[in-house]
Image (tube, helix red, strand yellow):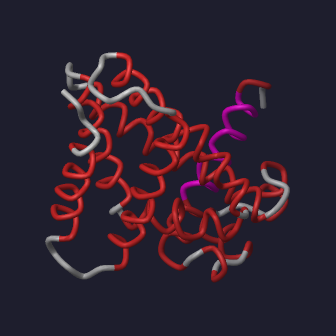
Amino acid sequence: MTSTARTRQREQTRRILLHESRALFATKGYAAVGLSEIVTSAGVTKGALYHHFDSKADLFRALLTQVQEEVGAQVAAAAGAESDPWTQLTTGCAAFLKACADPRVHRILLIDGPAVLGWHEWRAMDEANSARHLDEALQTLVGAGVLAPQPIAPLTRLLSGAMNEAAVWLATTTDPDALTDTIAALDRLLAGLRIT
């Protein structure tokens, strides 16, 4: 087998492990899934898993990164389809809530993420992904005079925390109007910040 073929095979094994663990973690939760179940589902050996990941927590960390990147890409695509900075913000926030309503996302991103990795590591990962984009959007709006001049860091954390909490609630409620109502409430909250 050539070096290129081995590299492709390793990448494929890693993709399969992430795919299968995502399905298991999203359905059962991190604590209820063992390594044996992951490797059986992926059709690989534990040695293959340990070649790519040091532990189950390391596998989860890589998976959480993947989920955060996917959600970030969905938010960026939705916001980027708008030309007005205010509409970019509101559309991006709504896209975040919609993405987190997906059961394959919310359990990994918002429930098991902080529980498995700890609040500080999870928060740092969130900061590097979605919070950074929110911070940039708010800075743009302050610069454009749409929002009053103010410290952006606390505003970013307040809005990020509110959206994360709303996303966790959306994941557990049975109210069929919850997502629509939550997006409407967020729009009203954001509108209260606008000066123009």
Magenta span covers which residues? Answer: 5-19
Q: Residue at x 43, y 45 (%)?
A: 71
Q: Is residue 9 magenta?
A: yes
Q: Is residue 47 left or right of residue 113?
A: right
Q: Nearer the viewer, residue 37 or 137?
A: 137
Q: Residue at x 42, y 49 (%)?
A: 159
Query: Could you say which quadrant of the image residue 43 lies in?
Result: bottom right
> What x and y, as percent, mark residue 141?
33, 24
Q: Is residue 143 magenta?
A: no
Query: Could you say which quadrant of the image residue 84 lies in?
Result: top left
| In the rendered image, the vertical position of residue 128 relative to residue 42, given as above or below | above
| In the rendered image, the vertical position of residue 12 relative to residue 38, given as above or below | above
| In the rendered image, the vertical position of residue 72 relative to residue 31, given as above or below | above
> What x and y, as percent, mark residue 57?
75, 63
Q: Nearer the viewer, residue 137 or 19?
A: 137
Q: Nearer the viewer, residue 37 or 6?
A: 37
Quadrant (top left, top right, bottom left, bottom right) of the N terminus = top right
Q: Residue at x 31, y 16 (%)?
A: 144
> Could you tell me what secondary structure mostly forms the magenta stretch?
helix
Q: How many marks?
A: 0
Quadrant (top left, top right, bottom left, bottom right) of the C terminus = top left
> What x and y, as percent, mark residue 38?
66, 69
Q: Is residue 112 left or right of residue 131?
A: right
